[in-house]
Image (cartoon, rainbow, N blue to C red):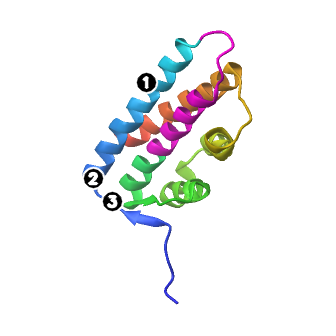
Amino acid sequence: MARTRSTKKKDAAYVSGRLAVARGYLKDARNSNAWSDPGDIGNPSISTVINCAIAYADAITAKYSGEINQGDHGAVVKLLRAALGNELPHRQEANLMALLEQKDEVQHGSRLKTREDAERALERLEEFAAWAEMQLMK
């Protein structure tokens, strides 16, 4: 039986495109939180936050290792660590893991998240995105 990989090869054009997507998600997440009404649920905003974090992680791994994670979002952090080694700060690893851990529940579950949950997720994302931007500008 052939071994299947959960990564896919990508080039420099992919990096710039995925970075543009990440920035778009970041803008959308900020707008979602800024324009929310009292009592709105946080799930849609958190979903956007998570997609943004994944897009940033993809851009970084594509730049540094020429690969992206394919389908298994739990492996995103491992691939990022493999691509960056000790250049991945533990705090940013924790931010990414905390966001990814919510993915299934937020996007496929029925538990409603609050706007406060969305604000906390956006705060984690803002920190992760600022760090990711620095990595991508090197």
- Marked residue nearer the N-terminal end (1 or 2): 2
Task: Kindly report which numbered mark, 1 or 3, lies closer to the viewer in this rendering.
Answer: 1
Q: Which residue is mark 3?
A: 10
- Image marks 1 and 2: residues in contact by CB distance under 8 Å: no
- What is the quadrant of residue 38 in the picture? top right
Query: Which x, y percent locates residue 34?
Result: 53, 13
Q: Main secondary structure of the magenta part?
A: helix
| Residue occupying the point 62% across, 56% down | 74
Q: Which residue is mark 2?
A: 12
Tag 1, which secondary structure?
helix
Q: Which residue is mark 1?
A: 27
| Residue type at numbered disc 2 | Ala
Tag 2, which secondary structure?
helix
Query: Residue placed farthest to the right in the image?
Result: 111
Q: CA distance from mark 2 to mark 3?
A: 7 Å
Q: CA distance from mark 1 to mark 3?
A: 25 Å
| Residue type at numbered disc 1 | Lys
Q: Looking at the image, which is closer to me, 133 or 17?
A: 17
Query: Which region is colored magenta?
Result: 37-56
Q: Within 10 Å of the Cα at label 1, are there few (<14), some (14-19), or many (20+) other Cα atoms?
A: some
